[in-house]
Image (cartoon, helix red, strand yellow):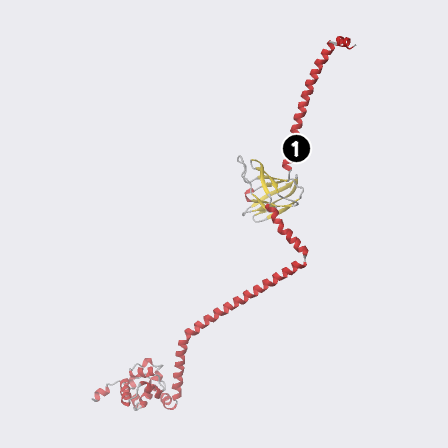
Amino acid sequence: MSDEKDNLTIGQKLHDARVAKGYTLDDLQKNTKIQKRYLIAIEDNDFDALPGEFYVRAFVKQYADSVGLDGSELLSQFDTKLPDTEDPEYVDRVNSDNPETRSAQRKVEERNDKLKRYIPIISVSVVVLIILIAIWVAAARSTRNTAKTQIETSKVSVSGDKSSSSKSSSTKKAKSPKKTKGITFKKVTASGSNITYQVTGTSGKTPLKIAATGTGSAWTSVSADGTSLWQASLTGGNSHTISLPSTTSTVTINTGNAQATQITVGGKKLTLAAPLNGGSTQVRVVTLQFGKSSSSASSSSSSTTTGSSTTTGTTGTTGTTGTTNDTTGSTGTDNSNTGTTNGY
């Protein structure tokens, strides 16, 4: 029987003493201030589950004292089966003289457990707070921009009311694009790479814009009514605008790189027709006729032709008449005596 008692583990011995006293684990937890899970670990001899080797002997001694056993004797009996501590006297002092230390440790552990449970909730709360702050900042910025826009609109309205001249200029600017819509290009003649267009719908000074497209360069010269206005080589993306006088009738544009040159008259782009009879697509001469110059020239040409025909006809008739008169005169000469006698 004594051998069976000697074979008992320290955990089993403490468990039997607790049952003999009629204590439950909850009762023992209240008496010793040791958490229930540590009491279960001691009874199962699972000393690794305790917070440290220092607490093993302290908890075992306190457990033994609470169930009517001699804690010091029990530690001596199972000394080889328990973890060593650095200061056994300090363990005894902690268990007998300073139970508040264990209570404080238990509170620290409970607080850590609660903190671990609250970490997910805290994380979600922080994320929600960041989102709310971002929404608030965006709303405030939007409100500020809206207010700024309204202020600027009010300033524009006030300045528009105070300045009637600004209204007039704005009206003219608004109407000017409508004029460009009426500009039309009509191909008049084409020969090889040369082409002539009749331009209608312009009024006053007309802007002529030459622009270079693509990445290369394009040389262009512009002359109006035989007078050179501008010539230069433009690189890709650059442009030059010429203001044509209202009296301009004919504009000649020579392009060294027509495929990379864009011509715009009065805001309307001119699309060149393809050259004829194998003409060059690169070097081209474009003639623009404004107003009624083309029709006037045609009328003058027709008048000249008619006048020549009339003169020729008159000359022919005169010649015939003269010949007839000569014949008549001869006849009159032959019968002069007779005529004279008859007259008298």
In the image, is residue 316 above or below residue 128?
above
| Residue 160, picture quadrant | bottom right
| Residue 47, picture quadrant | bottom left
* Viewport quadrant of the C terminus: top right
Whole-percent x and y of residue 240?
Answer: 61, 47
Whole-percent x and y of residue 200?
Answer: 61, 41
| Residue 183, picture quadrant | top right
Question: Exactly how many numbered labels are in the figure?
Answer: 1
* Viewport quadrant of the N terminus: bottom left
- Choose between 146 and 22: the one closer to the eye: 146
| Residue bearing mark 1 | 300
| 152 sits to left or right of 332 | left
> Badge 1 local density, few (<14 within 10 Å), some, or many (20+)?
few
| 114 sits to left or right of 280 | left
Q: Residue at x 44, y 74 (%)?
A: 122
Whole-percent x and y of residue 331?
Answer: 71, 11
- Choose between 330 and 149: the one closer to the eye: 330
Q: Residue at x 62, y 62 (%)?
A: 154
In the image, is residue 245 above or below residue 277?
below
